[in-house]
Structures are given as C-alpha cells and as structure tokens.
Amino acid sequence: MGLINPRSVVQVHLVPPKCFRHRREIISDDDSAAKFGTTPADRFDFEIFSSIFNSSFLIINSVLSHFFYLARCRDGSLYSGYSRNIAEREKAHNSGKGAKYTAARRPVEIIYSEKFAEKSDALRREIEVKKFSRAEKLKLIRAKN
C-alpha cells in the first residue's frame, strides 16, 4: 500500500450529531418532520450516525471541499472562480445571480475544476490562474481532459 498524500485527505473527524444542526439548508423540509416530532436535520443526524454506528470516524468529503473552477461563457470567454459546490455555482451563474461578468454572458458552463481541502489553497489557485493568459488556461483545460 502506498503512502497517502496529506493534501488528498479532506478531513477525518469524530463528529457529534449536534455539529450537523447548522446544515439545515441541505435538508428539505417535509411533512414527515411534524409526524416524527423531529426536524429534517435531526433525521439527517440519525441517519448518518446510525450508518456509522460501529465506526469511530466519519469522513466528510463533499461537505468540506473547496473548488477552483473555470467556466466558459456564451461569448467564448473564460471566467475563473471559487465555490464550495460546483453544480450550485453553475446554476447561480446561469440564473444571473453568480457574478456580474457572467450574468451578461449566459449560458455559462463550468468546464474545469480542481478540488482542495483548504479554502486558502483554492483561492490561491484562483489568483494564480487568473494571471494566466487565455492560451495557458486552455492548455490547462486540455491537459485535464
């Protein structure tokens, strides 16, 4: 078994259920909350912790990820940005709420992304790539595909 790159591990925690209560926005409310006398977030806590009852660790990957991305606009221009959720960010850009630059250049398609464990690393990469020429950005996109 090879060595694990510390940058590839997002975070490993022993997480008490109350830590998830602030994440109510990712759970949709429904009628079953009233029926069971719990909030959707409480049910989410129970489902997660019942599924890992015999484990000491909970690996939270997608919740704690940070992304740098490149998006192609309708006019062919490239927009670089940071997001915690690529799919939601693309929806925001296409609804006109993402950024002023992309609002006038819809539709927008995210064509490249890099995942980071730390927000500062993703923002640092965004600043670095924003300084690239268009040719360098296209080369970066081609290298990944």
Image: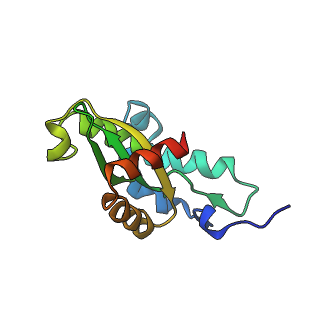
Counting from the top left corner in percent of width and height, residue 57 is at: 68, 62
Counting from the top left corner in percent of width and height, residue 82 is at: 35, 55
Can residue 69 be seen at all in this image of the molecule? no
Looking at this rendering, what residue extends furthest in the right direction?
Answer: 1
Figure colour scheme: rainbow
Counting from the top left corner in percent of width and height, residue 138 is at: 41, 44
Residue displayed at 38% across by 39% down: 110
Does residue 12 appear to the left or right of 3 in the view shown? left
Can residue 44 be seen at all in this image of the molecule? yes
Residue displayed at 73% across by 66% down: 4
Looking at the image, is 8 positioned above or below residue 81? below
Counting from the top left corner in percent of width and height, residue 75 is at: 22, 32
Depth check: give the residue in front, 96 or 32: 96
Quadrant of the rendering where the N terminus is positioned: bottom right
Does residue 5 appear to the left or right of 139 in the view shown? right
Looking at the image, is 41 positioned above or below residue 94? below
Looking at this rendering, what residue extends furthest in the front direction?
Answer: 135
Depth check: give the residue in front, 34 or 53: 53
Depth check: give the residue in front, 72 or 24: 72
Residue displayed at 32% across by 49% down: 134
Does residue 111 appear to the left or right of 49 in the view shown? left
Quadrant of the rendering where the C terminus is positioned: top right
How many numbered circles are shown? 0
Picture quadrant where residue 93 is located: top left
